[in-house]
Image (cartoon, rainbow, N blue to C red):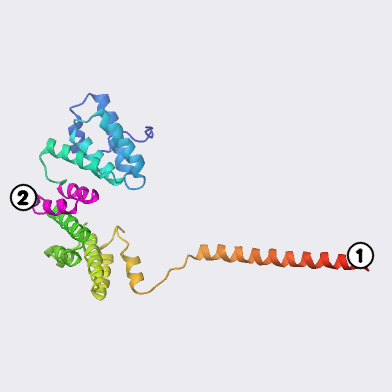
Amino acid sequence: MPIPEDVTGDEIDKDVRQELLSLPKTLAEDVAKNLVMVAKLLDEDPEKAYGYSRVALRLASRVAAVREAAGFAAYAVGKYSEALGEFRAARRMTGGVELWPVMADCERGMGRPEKALAMAGEPEVQRLDRAGQVEMRLVAAGARRDMGQADAAVVTLQSPELASNAVHPWTARLRYAYADALLEVGREDEARDWFAKALEADQAGTTDASDRLAELDGVQFTDVLEDSEDSEDSADADEDARGGAAGEAEAEGRSESEKG
């Protein structure tokens, strides 16, 4: 797949670069460039990111960072079984537990929430850092909801991290998930409060908390540009109709004149 000229491969994380040192220099450079493209496109064009990840995988399948990148690319396009296989391979290579929450979420994606919930109780969770444990809690709550256990999902999300006023990269998503779970069990007033708290913490705009708040408040947004276009279309249609009517009247007048 084409690599833009401004992509050198030097943009990758130093730890990944260290892993690539096991490869011949030219090969390492090619792999690095493809990994950069995966990272660049993962959010905006996951299908293309997946394509670049497959190239990197063909070039260096024995590098853990490549397997991990391939896993995230497959995950982004909904290929959960494939993603889980790549994450497992990366974990075998590194011995780490960082991928445990996303592996559990792959189980959810494959329609096995019970398996995801079981993973939430495994010893690996205790080895996760705080952010990883929050991610695991989010996955477990999602699994509860998949299984129709909405009240249990609410309880699962109740934690010191949720109660804290400190803002971390995961705070907005945790508050949002809690608000959404509350709404599902009919606790609308509380849900509104937590959507507001999620919005307050969502400096990066990772959630649609503002839209959910507006929906709860009964606010409807109008697309001014769309309305303007609709108005113009309506005006054109009216003018065409008037023109058509005038033409018909004129034709009728000529007809009557000819008869006379």
Q: Which of marks 1 and 2 is in front?
A: 1
Whether residue 22 can be seen here: yes
Residue type at mark 2? Pro
Measured from the top left, where is residue 9 in percent x and y? Answer: 29, 34
Q: Name the residue under label 1.
A: 258
Task: Identify the residue at image location x=37%, y=33%.
Answer: 3
Q: What stretch is highlighted in magenta?
A: 100-128
Query: In the drawing, does residue 11 fall left or right of residue 225?
Result: left
Question: Which mark is drawn over residue 123?
Answer: 2
Q: In which quarter of the image is the N terminus?
A: top left
Sequence-earlier tag: 1 or 2: 2
Measured from the top left, where is residue 118 in percent x and y? Answer: 11, 52
Choose between 260 and 130: the one closer to the eye.
260
**Disc 2, SS:** helix
Task: Identify the residue at image location x=36%, y=47%.
Answer: 44
Q: Quadrant of the C terminus?
A: bottom right
Query: In the drawing, does residue 16 fall left or right of residue 213?
Result: left
Residue most extreme to the right:
260
Measured from the top left, where is residue 5 in percent x and y? Answer: 38, 33
Measured from the top left, where is residue 47 in percent x and y? Answer: 35, 42
- On screen, residue 71 above or below 29: below
Q: Rounded to the nearest whole Å, what is the CA distance between mark 1 and mark 2?
A: 98 Å
Task: Identify the residue at image location x=8%, y=51%.
Answer: 122
Whether residue 131 can be seen here: no
Q: Quadrant of residue 178?
A: bottom left
Question: Which mark is drawn over residue 47?
Answer: none
- On screen, residue 140 above or below 89: below
